Image (cartoon, helix red, strand yellow):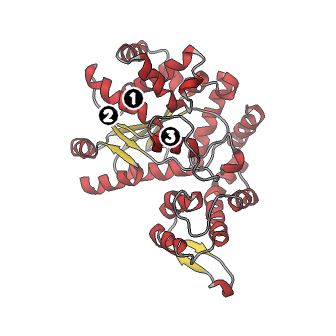
């Protein structure tokens, strides 16, 4: 596969690439660059975590990227996930891996790694300290947005370890590419600055879009100085707001109810979460969106691209209710194999039950 084709596949994933020229040069010199993304184990999985990540991985793997999925259990501990119980957090990490398997992530083409395995390595902590020595206190505090926290929420000193450790992860994992959400931009940019200073390298940053919750776009809440990034973080799909979030274990009825209550104004395409799910998930996974409706409203139609759907919706040719029904059906088809895996596989089922009984 030529460099241009590989680059186009990666650009399907990256909402922002820093920088595209550096990415091109990386692809010209390495057949299989290493990329990583890290995940705090906490609670049950939603479609942004599971299905959207699997879709992005598919394009990256096609582009020849070797991907490392970093189960960030110690980070979840620092961030008080699962009540700050490290053993519960580890259990969620095992569950996460089962979710990825159920979504079809090719286990022979990605690597699952645990933050806790790096903790006993003195070289890892040496990197953490070197980065901390080259980062101002104010810069570290501003990086707290990567945890979904505002500067005003700094109440425990341990929170300052988090961005320094995440920055160290990049170099510990030998990652050429930081392939995380836009909300992780601050630490990735820090890595680009301190890497060359410390005799390492400048990683390329490929930041994917943050899927918004069913409530639609929210007002910025003060997570980041950049207003656009602040809005994305404030609006993203969050497990802490279950009625604005589609979980991979939701029933068909759950999905239809939640989508039915979602923000989706007639003829409005900007900041419309239902349209967003078609753009970032449905049309990247399915060849078409089937919209069923009575003959008096034009009858059933099939839409083959997001551009076509957006145009028709803006012109009022598709009613919000018809769009919601179609999206509910499509998402249910994508979620169904995951539900089945957790119903039929005993290990997966036991992990899910353990998570549900200990969620905080």
* Residue depicted at 45% across the width and 48% down the height: 57
- In this figure, which residue is indicated by the disc labeled 3? 230
Work out whether 73 lies above or below 181: above
Q: Is residue 3 visible?
A: yes
Q: Secondary structure at mark 2?
A: loop
Residue occupying the point 56% across, 51% down: 51
| Residue 195 location (% of width, % of height) | 30, 25
Secondary structure category for the residue under label 1:
helix
Question: Residue 172, image x and y in percent?
Answer: 39, 24
User: On the picture, is 100 further left or further right than 357?
Assistant: left
Mark 1–mark 3 CB contact (< 8 Å): no
**Foreground residue among 101 and 198:** 198
Q: Residue at x 61, y 23 (%)?
A: 77
Q: Residue at x 53, y 58 (%)?
A: 276
Q: Which mark is residue 131?
A: none
Measure the alpha-carbon separation of dots 2 and 1.
Answer: 8 Å
Q: Quadrant of the C terminus?
A: top right
Badge 3 or badge 2: first in the primary sequence: 2
Say which element carries label 3.
Answer: helix
Residue for badge 1: 170
Q: Which residue is mark 2?
A: 203
**Relative height, residue 152 to residue 270 (above, below):** above
- How many labels sit on residues? 3
């Amino acid at each position: 596969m030529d460099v241009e084709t590989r680059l186009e596949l990666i650009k399907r994933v990256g909402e922002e690439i820093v920088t595209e020229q550096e990415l091109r040069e990386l692809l010209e010199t390495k057949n299989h660059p290493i990329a990583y993304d890290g995940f705090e184990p906490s609670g049950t999985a939603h479609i942004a975590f599971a299905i959207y990540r699997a879709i992005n991985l598919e394009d990256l793997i096609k582009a020849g990227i070797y991907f490392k999925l970093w189960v960030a259990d110690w980070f979840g501990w620092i961030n008080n996930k699962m009540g700050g119980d490290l053993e519960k957090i580890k259990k969620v990490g095992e569950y996460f891996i089962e979710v990825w398997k159920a979504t079809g992530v090719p286990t022979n083409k990605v690597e699952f790694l645990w933050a806790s395995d790096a903790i006993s390595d003195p070289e890892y902590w040496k990197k953490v300290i070197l980065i901390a020595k080259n980062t101002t206190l104010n810069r570290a505090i501003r990086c707290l947005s990567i945890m979904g926290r505002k500067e005003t929420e700094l109440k425990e000193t341990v929170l300052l370890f988090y961005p320094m450790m995440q920055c160290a992860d990049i170099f510990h994992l030998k990652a050429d590419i930081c392939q995380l959400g836009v909300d992780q931009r601050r630490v990735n940019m820090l890595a680009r600055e301190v890497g060359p200073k410390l005799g390492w390298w400048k990683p390329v940053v490929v930041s994917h879009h943050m899927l918004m919750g069913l409530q639609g776009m929210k007002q910025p809440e003060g997570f980041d100085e950049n207003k656009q990034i602040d809005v994305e973080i404030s609006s993203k799909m969050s497990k802490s707001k279950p009625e604005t979030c589609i979980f991979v274990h939701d029933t068909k009825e759950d999905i239809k109810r939640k989508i039915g209550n979602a923000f989706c104004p007639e003829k409005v395409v900007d900041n419309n979460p239902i349209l967003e799910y078609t753009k970032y998930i449905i049309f990247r996974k399915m060849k078409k969106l089937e919209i069923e409706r009575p003959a008096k409203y034009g009858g059933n139609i099939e839409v083959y691209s997001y551009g076509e759907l957006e145009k028709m919706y803006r012109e009022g040719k598709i009613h919000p209710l018809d769009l919601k029904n179609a999206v509910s059906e499509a998402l249910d088809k994508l979620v169904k194999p995951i539900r089945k895996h957790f119903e039929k596989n005993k290990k997966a089922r036991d992990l899910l039950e353990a998570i549900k009984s200990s969620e905080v």
